[in-house]
């Protein structure tokens, strides 16, 4: 699976209306950017639907920023 930063930013823009995804720092934790746990879950669900990225509950803490999602996705087997 090849997931790009722009893909994640697009999903964030679609899911989280109160955050400007273009201004979000890639290493900024979602919680520090007004992205709550429900938004986080919605982002991951959209990434699963659009790109096949499956994140089990026990791995949620590994996906709390754009950078962490990219790292997590890179470690997954397609």
Image (spheres, rainbow, N blue to C red):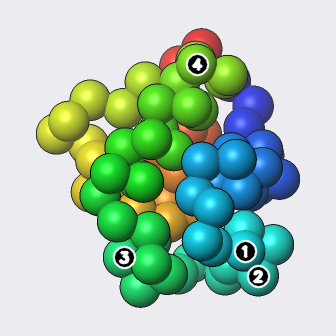
Determine the image quadrant of residue 35: bottom left
Residue that badge 3 annotates? 31
Q: Residue at x 49, y 81 (%)?
A: 33
Q: Is residue 75 above or below residue 35?
A: above
Q: Earlier in the sequence, mark 3 or mark 1?
A: 1
Are the two marked residues, 1 and 2, in contact with CB atoms closer than 8 angstroms? yes
Residue that badge 4 annotates? 49
- Count up the numbered dots: 4
User: Disc 4 and disc 1: Cα gap in Å?
Assistant: 22 Å
Q: Is residue 75 above or below residue 30?
A: above
Q: Secondary structure at mark 1?
A: loop
Are the two marked residues, 4 and 3, in contact with CB atoms closer than 8 angstroms? no
User: Disc 3 and disc 2: Cα gap in Å?
Assistant: 15 Å
User: Disc 4 and disc 3: Cα gap in Å?
Assistant: 23 Å
Res. 20 mark: 1
Q: Quadrant of the C terminus?
A: top right
User: Disc 3 and disc 1: Cα gap in Å?
Assistant: 14 Å
Are the two marked residues, 4 and 2, in contact with CB atoms closer than 8 angstroms? no
Q: Earlier in the sequence, mark 4 or mark 3?
A: 3
Q: Residue at x 43, y 24 (%)?
A: 54
Res. 9 mark: none
CA neighbours of label 2 inside 10 A, class few (<14), some (14 to 19), many (20+): few
Determine the image quadrant of residue 7: top right
Q: Earlier in the sequence, mark 3 or mark 2?
A: 2
Are the two marked residues, 3 and 2, in contact with CB atoms closer than 8 angstroms? no
Q: Secondary structure at mark 2?
A: helix
Residue that badge 2 annotates? 23
Q: Nearer the viewer, mark 1 or mark 2?
A: 1
Q: Secondary structure at mark 3?
A: helix
Q: Earlier in the sequence, mark 4 or mark 1?
A: 1
């Amino acid at each position: 699976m090849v997931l790009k930063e722009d893909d994640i930013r697009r999903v964030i823009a679609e899911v989280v209306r109160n955050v400007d995804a273009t201004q979000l720092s890639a290493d900024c934790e979602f919680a520090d950017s007004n992205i709550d746990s429900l938004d986080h879950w919605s982002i991951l669900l959209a990434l699963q639907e659009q790109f096949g990225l499956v994140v089990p509950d026990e791995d949620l803490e590994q996906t709390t920023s754009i950078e962490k999602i990219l790292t997590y996705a890179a470690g997954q087997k397609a």
